Amino acid sequence: MWLLSNVLFEFTIYLIVDNITKFILINTKLFQLTINCLYNFISNYTHHYSSSKVLIAKKLPEKYLYSYHLKLTNDLRLQQSSLVQLLPRPGILKLHETTCSLNILLQSLASLNSFYSSLQRNINLSRFNYDPIVSTFLDLISQLRANHHTTEYKHANTLVGLSSFISKLSTIYPDLLTKPTTPDIAELFQCITDALNQSLSKQKLVYSKNFSVIGQVHNQKLTTLSLDFLNRMYIETEAQLHNKVTVDNIDAQTSYIIQYIDLTWLLHHIQLGSILKHTFSGQLLHAYCCNKCSHVRFCAEPFQILILPVSKTTITLEQLLSQLTKIEDVDSISCSYCSSQTNQDLERKSTVIKNGTILTKTIPTLSPLVNTHIQPFDQAVSSTANISIPLSTHTSNLATSYKSDRMKCQTLIANFPSILCIQLKRLFYDPVSRTTTKLNTNIIIEPEKILDLSHIHYTTWLGLIDSSMIIPARYQLTGICLNSSNNFHSSSMNQTNSNSKQYVCLYRTDNSQWFLSDNEHKTEINEIDNICRTLCVTENCYLLFYERCS
């Protein structure tokens, strides 16, 4: 009896639990079904009755609205919502009109990742006593870069001030940022790098630790030699190349040409061990060939800014770079070999003349271009013996009698910089009318395309097909400085009225996001390719920054 009652009790409990479970499951399915029906009904109703209506977005607070007050950014194509974000980030406080170019330049420099990493790696403020401009510059770049990483606008609502940096820069260049004038952004870049070079050169950097320098030296043994030994080798190499290289035997002199470039490259970096020089400087190789005797001489010239002349024809940047190697006729330079031969002939003839009836005066040969001592940054180094003045100044001292002996010149890149700065030479100054004319030629730039400059390297010109001899030179565009000025009156090429020049820049951050910087505002760019196809960019691109790909 007890067993039977126990079984009945358990069976009753089972039925109760089973019914409760079924009830819960059935109601859950009904609840989900009800929710799905309501969701579908609301969605269909909303789509049916509101698809033809225009949605009106709430207006943004006035403090967040971007003011397109510059002429360049007044173009409606730059204000399309598909191209730019509506919420800009703050930029640099513009103290007065003359700081416009400085603001834009600093925004561009702050976007250069390799440059900033190099500064952090090589500048030790606790160990070395630098000029105050170095610490101020480093702090300024750090503030600008911190703003790039901010994901929300409300966390980046402070303008960066320049008053401290300007005061320190003015002690070195008192007239650079005077209020009546606006400095050219390329000239300003050169002045800032020169000022930092002078301070950073006091820290003895070893160029052998910088791969951008030693990585382009073909004979690595040269990097271990002392300065005195390098100078002696330079003299010997000059002697080997002087008046001995012709078009016919240039293949036999290849090893000396390569050694000449290696030596000039190393001597160039030893003379001023600044990290800025290691970062921005490259080296050109000018080859001069005489039409009369076919002798070839070489001249190495360091550069921080690669200047490309702009014509009146629409052209791509790659085509413009290819024109750098175009062979041109030069009238202002005479052949040292032909001059020496002529001098010898004149001396022989003068000994025949009796009683001084005919006065013979020998015509001097080329003035020196460079000596074997350490050279200033802006000087060129030539394979012509006994040379000691810059390439840019030696042509005025040439003998006019030999201008008829035309020479051909071809320019190639001998050494590539870590960061390539390209200046598109749009401005031309007329000293008579005191007017600067700007060419609004369309220069087509592809911002996402890798720029390969291997084809204009001197090894290609020498026909060196060995892969170990070819230096890779692939660059990525990081910054575009735009000059929106028109024709204007000025007292010089680089100093103009403050209202004549207006600058903005486009720059890439380390996460490949592009920004449009207009002094106190920075606006995020959604479609950089479309922006770069507008006339605002193609007609006004002026200073470009390319970072070398690793």
Image: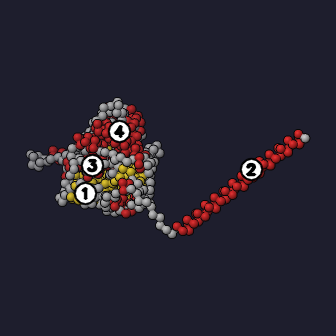
Q: Position of residue 238 (x, y in %)?
A: 31, 40
Mark 2 neighbour density, 10 Å: few (under 14) some (14–19) many (20 or more) = few
Residue 229 visible at all: no
Q: Which color scheme did the rendering employ for the protein?
A: secondary structure
Residue type for callout 4:
Ile
| Residue contact at pointers 4 and 1, CB within 8 angstroms | no
Task: For marks 4 and 1, give the CA distance.
Answer: 34 Å
Determine the residue positioned at 30% across, 47% down.
Answer: 189
Q: Quadrant of the N terminus?
A: top right
Label 3 neighbourhood size at 10 Å, few (<14), some (14-19), many (20+)?
A: few
**SS at mark 1 in the image:** loop
Residue 277: numbered disc: none
Judge the density around disc 4: few (<14), some (14-19), many (≥20) Cα neighbours within 10 Å: many
User: Mark 1 sits on what residue?
Assistant: 500
Expressed as whole percent of the image width and height from the top left, the position of residue 153 reads 41, 50
Do the numbered discs 4 and 3 sit on residues whose CB atoms are within 8 Å? no
Label 2, label 4: how far apart the Cα atoms are: 77 Å
Residue at image position (20%, 52%) is 180
Residue that badge 4 annotates: 275
Q: Which residue carries the number 3 mark?
A: 95
Q: Which image quadrant for residue 57?
A: bottom left
Q: Residue at horizontal 28%, vertical 47%?
A: 188
Which of 331/165 is in front?
Answer: 165
Q: CA distance from mark 4 to mark 3?
A: 30 Å
Q: Amino acid at mark 3?
A: Leu
Q: Are marks 3 and 2 in contact (CB under 8 Å)?
A: no
